[in-house]
Image (cartoon, rainbow, N blue to C red):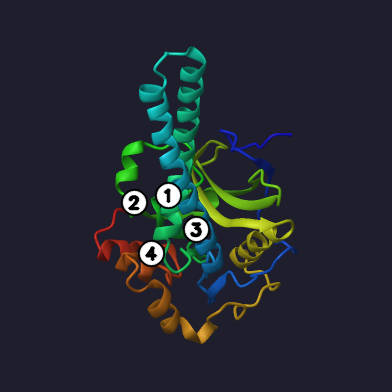
Amino acid sequence: MPSKYKPQILGWIGDLDKGGNYLTGADQRLLYANDNYCAFIRKTKSNQIFYLFISLILIILLIPTMVLLILLFFVYNTENESEIAILSISSFILCFFAIYIIIPEFYHNLFTRRGSPIIFNRKTGKVYVNESYFFNFKVLRNPLTFLHPNKKRIKEYDWAYLQGVVVHNYSRYSLNSTILMVCKPNTYKTIDHIMLDPLRNGIGSYLVWGWVNNFMCANDLISLNDGKYKWEQETQFKKEIIKGQGWPDWMVEAFNATTHEELANIKQKYNIEAS
């Protein structure tokens, strides 16, 4: 049966249930956790370098190919043969579309910093992202955004309106990704997507989702010391991962908010419109 979240996302495998989950494992993606919030890395350095290199090579190959196709159509096709014209035009369109798909991949690997952590606060039910604009699961984009490669999105979301799905990338390695669908309140209509756990093999694509759910439910199946930074190393975590990455001051303070009232006071202090 298809996903209940509409519009349907490309490569959909299945919808994920919230609540306590025995499939759980931080698997070196968990950076830090305390009793209020946890932070997960979404892009490992090795994956980032690998996909940056692959996308760069493809761009380097595609651009000269497009130039040659233009020359084939306008210069070398002196006899105006329709077969050559059709072949060159169709090939140029395919190359252009490939560039259109690859450039966002190149940008988000180039401009992702420190793994692009995602923050979950279980006391307020808020989720915070600070990421490259190109780090999402979109296909259709305004080409003008390509002129702003380091564009970012910094947002606060409600965990209640985030729903998990697993998708695959159609590769021979069957790599799966966990996507958070941002839904309109009390509906299945999606208005945005957040990448939670990209490009994992098999059961591994469900482990981070399970850990986050157990954390948000305050389930004892997890340990708050599973991350790279231990409970008492919050200052070190913020200094090495958060500081200097463009996180708003109010948001960093909101990581540790314990009630909705405290969160409202923080937003009022910084003149942030309440959501």
Work out whether mark 2 precedes mark 1 in sequence or the reverse, and give the earlier one.
Answer: 1
Left or right relative to 37: residue 268 = left
Marks 4/2: CA–CA distance: 32 Å
Residue ID for mark 1: 134
Nearer the camera: disc 3 or disc 2: 3
Residue ID for mark 4: 263
The spot of residue 13 in percent (x, y) is 70, 43
The mark tally for this picture is 4
Residue at image point 70% right, 52% down: 173
Marks 4/1: CA–CA distance: 29 Å
Asked if the residues shown at circle 3 and circle 2 are in contact, with their CB atoms under 8 angstroms apart, the answer is no
Query: What residue type is disc 2 on?
Result: Pro
Closer to the camera, 189 or 209?
209
Residue 154 numbered tag: none
Residue ID for mark 3: 53
Q: Quadrant of residue 170?
A: top right
